[in-house]
Amino acid sequence: MLANVRILRFDPSADARPYHKEYEYRFEDYMTVLDVLCQLAGEQDSSLCFHYCCRSGHCGLCGLLVNGKPYLSCHKAAENGMTLAPLPGFPVKRDLMIDRRPHEDARGKLRLFLERESSPDDPIETIDMARFAGFRQVSRCVECLCCTAVCPVWTNRPHLFVGPALLATEARLFYDSRDTQKRALISKSSGLEQCVGCGQCTRVCPQDADPAKAIADMRTN
Amino acid sequence: MRRYYADIVVVGAGGAGLIAAAEACLHGGSVAVVSKGKAGRSGATVMAPGGVAAVHGLWSKDGDSKRLHEADSYHGGGWLNDQVLMGRVVDEIGDVLISLEKMGALWQRGPDGKTLLLKTDAGHSHNRSLFLEDRIGREMMKALCGELARRNVPVHDEIMLTNPVVRDGRILGALGFDVNTLEGVLFESKCLVLATGGCGMVYSNTTNPTDLTGDGFLFGLQAGARLCDMEFVQFYPLSMLFPESYRGVICATAMYSRLFNSEGERFMKRYDPARMENATRDYISRAIMHEVTQGRGSPRGGVFCDCTHNESGFFKRFLNHDYKLQLSAGVDMRKDRFEVAPSSHFMMGGLTVDSFWQSDVVGLYCVGEAAGGVHGANRISQNALSDILVSGVVAARHAAQTARKLERPFLAPGVLTKLTEEISSLVRSRDGITPSAQRAALRAVMWEKAGVLRSDASLREALRRLEELEKQPLRLGHGGSWVNREILHAFENKALFATARAIILSALARTETRGAHYRSDYPQTDEKWLKNIILTPTGGKLLVSAEDVRFSRMKKGEAIC
Ligand SMILES: Cc1cc2nc3c(=O)[nH]c(=O)nc-3n(C[C@H](O)[C@H](O)[C@H](O)COP(=O)(O)OP(=O)(O)OC[C@H]3O[C@@H](n4cnc5c(N)ncnc54)[C@H](O)[C@@H]3O)c2cc1C
């Protein structure tokens, strides 16, 4: 059976603006969006560009919009007539591949490493288990950026709010009972208080990392 | 072109590469990381769900000991392991895991917040693996990426290194290209630590991420380093066959499964009646492929897996990830049987290294899955992460010392010309097969002729077909030079060909069955073969030889206490 897909394409080195291109592909039961893209690139159009590495949800590189909603393309079932576009708000490298550089650059000021006055001699430290639950949950984040792409605050005020993905990453250290850095303060400088608590980020998270809860916890300390 | 210098350049941003970089910082000198994929989002480490095996006075119990860990590893490895290397791994991994926690990782603890929890998996006589939920690898990578940020280590990602620069038996640097712009990149360094991981992509079915194409093996051979144990490829028995993008992804655990052939027979009873589906990975993989080749396979070339006998609630507790994965392929594991097949999981072989993980080339170190010898003929579970961490640390420490003794190399930018010309001519190639068709054909040949089951005839057939395939010219689709993934694939294919050839030549030479290597024409283990097969690059060819194993720490049959 043949199915259709519409893909938003853009080669910044050649095109003036993005445009939609329609393709027909061989539909097979249970194929994922990633399967569709691999089939198109392998058989019809090798210039089609998209990013992925692990094929199973760990690398966080294959996020995109399917009919306007963000998903990991490796975990999303393909549909006839779907429209694919890159995650919005980020510069486009080519076609469905976003440029992650701005995101990576923003990591620097968040001091995303364990910091403390001194490291105790005890080789295995006792940690606060209540906080450990929070640590484990946000540590699931693979920074696929689906949450940041749908965040209304980040979309409208990218210079005032660093976005839920990076705040969840910061929260990993906030929940680490060994860390003595002022994580809430750092987050504040990155716009923590701009969050409107809409919960969109948590709803689209493919890893169940619950960024909304992490942000709320950092706000109430 | 771009040009960089660091005293120590680490190639590859998986666990082995990042811990090597972190360790090298502590010993003075400048350090840089270069990686084909994104740091923390490429390679196998970030995918590892299970655990990391480590015996340490602070957490081990029940009479467990380093000696026992070592003995388990040799038993699993068919006694071909390099005992000096494995001994180091076993002795040092505990302390490395403690320092990784100090960097920022946390391992799973009991309710007191202090007792580390331990688990086990195939091949270990005791519970000795630390873990965190079902994502130990991701946790390690988070801690290591943080550590490199703390130390301001430059990470040049999305650069594929393709060629070493060697003079008088010493490494001087490496050449590669930016995978986005195709621009040539030149690295000069006193020492280079290769941490490019394995080569799962050489087979149609693999658990590995798509960037593991054996690049380090080709790089090492070009530098003049030898390879060892390349016939030993571990196949994980139960992986998915569809949808295509999930081909090879791990999807079930043998001990919770019952396996049936197309005639509805629980066939393990013919292969291993005592252990059935509790048999080791290599036995199950072989049994499945025997059924397939004898015409009793499932429609897509595997067998049927049934988990329905497990109590309800079991799926949520133990197989949550597998359950969700199967559901997305339309399978409800609580009710349905599903197709499974073996999948290439881990490369035991790799570049030959000394006791500090230095290769035959001065200043060229090789760590993690790219190095050979540690695991012998078969790796037991959860030992890979132990290996990559210890090898990274030991090599970095030694490289820092070596670097202090060496002069800073300078290379004329002209060394890049050949590579950049090759790239431009590839961009214009219009006749032949596409890199993706070439790769698919190579992987199929390897799967069918040099995979789980091998024979002299099948291996020779594979060699012949690969030779033909490699001769065909390439046709590239779109000619642009901005983010042209086809160029990347074409270069990776070269490494796949070199790796495939190394696997085949070694497998042909080993006329016995041992560990993960099964020869249907030599189905028995032969004590004469307590040897490692070595490939030496000479005049564009690979010279095959065998060296006796040195039992420097433990002898087969020795009582361990
Ligand atoms: C799905 C899966 C689950 C696993 N589970 C476990 C487990 O539970 N326990 C365990 O002990 N082991 C496990 N293993 C094995 C273990 O994860 C790997 O052996 C280990 O992570 C390898 O680490 P590495 O650092 O050597 O290489 P990798 O982590 O694979 O990293 C290789 C790096 O090199 C880069 N690279 C490759 N080629 C080039 C080039 N030409 N130029 C520049 N850079 C390059 C890659 O982009 C990547 O960054 C698992 C493996 C897989 C695939």
Image: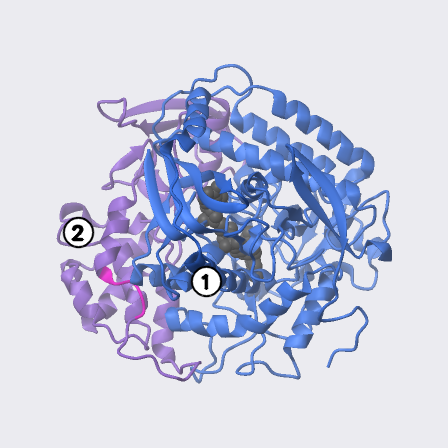
Chain colours: A purple, B blue
Please report, as a chain letter, where disc 1 is located: B
Asked if one can make out residue A183 in the rendered structure from this viewpoint, the answer is yes
In the image, what residue occupies the spot 44% across and 81% down? Answer: A124
Give me the C-alpha separation between circle 2 and circle 1.
51 Å
Q: Which residue in the structure is indicated by mark 1?
A: B401
Q: Position of residue A61 (x, y in %)?
A: 39, 45
In the image, what residue occupies the spot 48% across and 66% down? Answer: B133
Q: Residues within 10 Å of mark 2 (few under 14, many from 20)?
A: many
Kind of element beneath mark 2? helix
Q: Position of residue A105 (x, y in %)?
A: 24, 50
In the image, what residue occupies the spot 81% across and 39% down? Answer: B455
Magenta span: chief secondary structure = loop
Are the residues flagged by discs 2 and 1 from a single subunit? no
In this view, the mark in front (2 or 1): 1
Q: Is residue B538 left or right of residue A103?
A: right
* A111 within the magenta span: yes
Q: Position of residue A59 (x, y in %)?
A: 43, 49
Q: Which residue in the structure is indicated by mark 2?
A: A153
Q: Residue B455, relative to residue B131: is it above or below?
A: above
Asked if one can make out residue B44 in the rendered structure from this viewpoint, the answer is no
Residue type (three-letter) at the residue carrying disc 2: Val
Residue type (three-letter) at the residue carrying disc 1: Gln
* B385 within the magenta span: no
Quarter holding the C terminus of chain A is: bottom left
The residue stretch that appears in magenta: A110-114
Q: Nearer the viewer, residue B227 or A92?
A: B227
In the image, what residue occupies the spot 54% across and 44% down? Answer: B216
Please report, as a chain letter, where disc 2 is located: A
